[in-house]
Image (spheres, grey):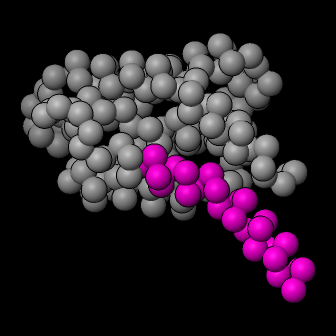
């Protein structure tokens, strides 16, 4: 029985980053602000994918990232699969920068997130403009990225606390 409880505890600890990211996805689509807020609401899972891609990529595998992107598209009525593909590209890019970002001060880590989030927003804007066959306004995505950058340190603190509960690699 002790072995079963130990494995159950380990399973929940390893699933926690994914569960928190799904919760952030759900929180991000709940209409909390004024009318039109949905376009400006921060895409909170981006911070989670960034954090775990740098710190512990194994707890946020491609399959989970893809599923979170699909969930977001279904909940928002967006282009089905666009967020999933963009999140996978984002994760791959961030993993490519792991050596540089690992062990750096929070400010450097935060600057890396801001640059990655701006790139994500630019690619998302281009893809949505292409799908709409017109140039969409870029200001909402830029504003959204600024909000994501502002909340990143708070989310990072949450992820750090969560990481303390994870077993060693």
Where 19 sits versus 130, above or below? below
Provide the major secondary structure of the magenta segment: helix
Give me the residue at 36% from left, 43% from top.
Answer: 28
Whole-percent x and y of residue 89? 49, 42
Position of 133 with respect to 5 (left or right) is: left
In this rendering, does residue 104 appear at all?
yes
Magenta region includes residue 112: no
**Camera-nearest residue between 75 and 95:** 75
Quarter holding residue 109: top right
Where the N terminus falls, by quadrant? bottom right
* Total numbered labels: 0
Give me the residue at 56% from left, 33% from top.
Answer: 155
Quarter holding residue 91: top right
In this rendering, does residue 126 appear at all?
no
Give me the residue at 65% from left, 31% from top.
Answer: 157
Where 8 sits versus 106, above or below? below
Whole-percent x and y of residue 75? 28, 56
Whole-percent x and y of residue 151? 48, 25
Start-end of magenta stretch: 1-25
């Amino acid at each position: 029985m002790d072995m079963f409880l130990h494995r159950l505890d380990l399973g929940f600890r390893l699933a926690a980053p994914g569960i928190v990211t799904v919760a952030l996805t759900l929180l991000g689509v709940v209409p909390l602000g004024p009318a039109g807020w949905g376009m400006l609401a921060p895409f909170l899972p981006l911070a989670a994918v960034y954090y775990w891609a740098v710190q512990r990529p194994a707890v946020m595998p491609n399959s989970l990232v893809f599923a979170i992107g699909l969930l977001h598209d279904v909940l928002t009525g967006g282009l089905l699969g666009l967020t999933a593909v963009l999140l996978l590209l984002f994760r791959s890019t961030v993993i490519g920068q792991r050596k540089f970002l690992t062990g750096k001060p929070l400010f450097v880590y935060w600057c890396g997130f801001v640059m990655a989030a701006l790139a994500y927003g630019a690619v998302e804007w281009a893809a949505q403009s292409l799908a709409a066959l017109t140039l969409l306004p870029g200001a909402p995505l830029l504003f959204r990225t600024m909000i994501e950058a502002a909340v990143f340190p708070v989310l990072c603190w949450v992820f750090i606390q969560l990481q303390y509960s994870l077993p060693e690699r």
